[in-house]
Image (cartoon, helix red, strand yellow):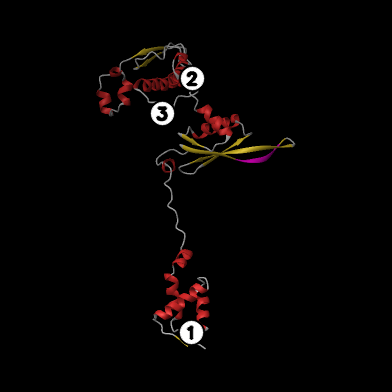
């Protein structure tokens, strides 16, 4: 026997709520079919939906998972106006079987990727040793330039290469502060490179005198008596300019110093130097 119940009645709501819990918060049609076997309600589906919406357990079970907020990107991923491979990631993949004569040999591939524009550079690596990693990095730098930062995982070969590259006995610290004297030394290094290029282009045996506005005595002293930064650059200056005389010129009397500070063509013509 089917009994009729009023639509908007507390007794009707209690009945629907009881059936909703009786059938373990089942879907709407299951609850509707069970109720219709004993009761006749006009807007039954709407009432079942309302009970389901007000049920806290149904809210929890039907709730969509909240997407976690995305973490901010590292600064090197957003390094605008930087050259490619300024920030470089390094990893290996492989091994890859290759033919060496009649035998098969394993080779790995070093994957260099630019962290800013996602450019890719590949190098073949013969083994997983530190020496092979260093050679791959040297070949990469010869093609793409020296990166500002390298990012790798904790592999043994990467650790060995990292210890060698950042060793204080090999290179100067990257965060070392440059002084005016060191900048003048770098300018002298650039001048020595230009002198070597001119000397190779014009093979004429003449005595040469080089002028610098640096008041330090680094260039005329043995390079191994200075610290790493000065020693490396002093050695590169002394090699192509061996046999030349270095002299000091004050900055106010140095024409190159005037041009490097910025001067228009008219001012350059009218200058006393």
Of the two numbered discs 2 and 1 on the same chain, state the one appearing first in sequence: 1
Of the two numbered discs 1 and 3 on the same chain, state the one appearing first in sequence: 1
Q: Position of residue 35 (x, y in %)?
A: 50, 80
State whether residue 21 is above or below residue 157. Answer: below
Q: In the rendered image, is residue 149 in sight?
A: yes
Give the residue drawn at x 44%, y 26%: 173
Q: The residue tagged with tag 1: helix, strand or loop?
A: strand
Q: Which residue has dot 1 on it?
A: 39
Q: Position of residue 212 (x, y in %)?
A: 36, 17
Magenta-colored span: 93-99
Disc 3 versus disc 2: nearer the observer: 3
Q: Which residue has dot 2 on it?
A: 200
Q: Is residue 54 left or right of residue 152?
A: left
> Is the C terminus in the top left, top right, bottom left or bottom right quadrant?
top left
Give me the disc on residue 250: none
Give the residue drawn at x 65%, y 37%: 107
Q: Is residue 107 left or right of residue 220?
A: right
The CA distance from mark 2 to mark 1 is 107 Å
Q: Position of residue 221 (x, y in %)?
A: 43, 11
User: Dot 2, crowdedness within 10 Å: few (<14), some or many (≥20)?
Assistant: few
Give the residue drawn at x 29%, y 17%: 253
The CA distance from mark 3 to mark 2 is 36 Å
Q: Position of residue 84 (x, y in %)?
A: 46, 39
What's the magenta bit mostly, secondary-structure-wise?
A: strand
User: Dot 3, crowdedness within 10 Å: few (<14), some or many (≥20)?
Assistant: few
Q: Which residue has dot 3 on it?
A: 175
């Amino acid at each position: 026997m089917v009994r009729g119940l009023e639509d908007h009645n507390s007794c009707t709501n209690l009945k629907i709520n009881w059936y909703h819990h009786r059938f373990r918060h089942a879907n709407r049609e299951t609850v509707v079919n069970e109720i219709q076997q004993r009761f006749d309600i006009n807007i039954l589906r709407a009432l079942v939906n309302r009970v389901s919406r007000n049920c806290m357990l149904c809210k929890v079970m039907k709730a969509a998972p909240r997407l976690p907020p995305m973490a901010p990107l590292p600064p090197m991923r957003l390094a605008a106006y930087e050259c490619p491979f300024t920030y470089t990631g390094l990893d290996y993949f492989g091994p890859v079987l290759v033919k060496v004569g009649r035998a098969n040999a394993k080779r790995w591939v070093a994957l260099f990727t630019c962290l800013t524009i996602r450019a890719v550079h590949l190098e073949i690596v013969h083994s997983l040793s530190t020496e092979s990693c260093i050679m791959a990095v040297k070949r990469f730098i010869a093609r793409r330039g020296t990166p500002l930062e390298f990012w790798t995982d904790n592999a043994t070969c990467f650790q060995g290469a990292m210890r060698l590259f950042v060793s204080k006995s090999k290179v100067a610290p990257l965060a070392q502060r440059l002084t005016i004297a060191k900048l003048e030394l770098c300018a002298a290094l650039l001048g020595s490179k230009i002198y070597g290029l001119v000397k190779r282009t014009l093979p004429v045996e003449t005595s040469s005198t080089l002028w610098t506005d640096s008041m330090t005595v680094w260039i005329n002293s043995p390079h191994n008596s200075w610290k790493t930064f000065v020693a490396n650059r002093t050695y590169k200056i002394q090699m192509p300019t061996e046999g030349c005389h270095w002299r000091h010129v004050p900055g106010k009397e140095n024409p190159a110093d005037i041009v490097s500070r910025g001067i228009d063509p008219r001012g350059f013509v009218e200058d006393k130097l």
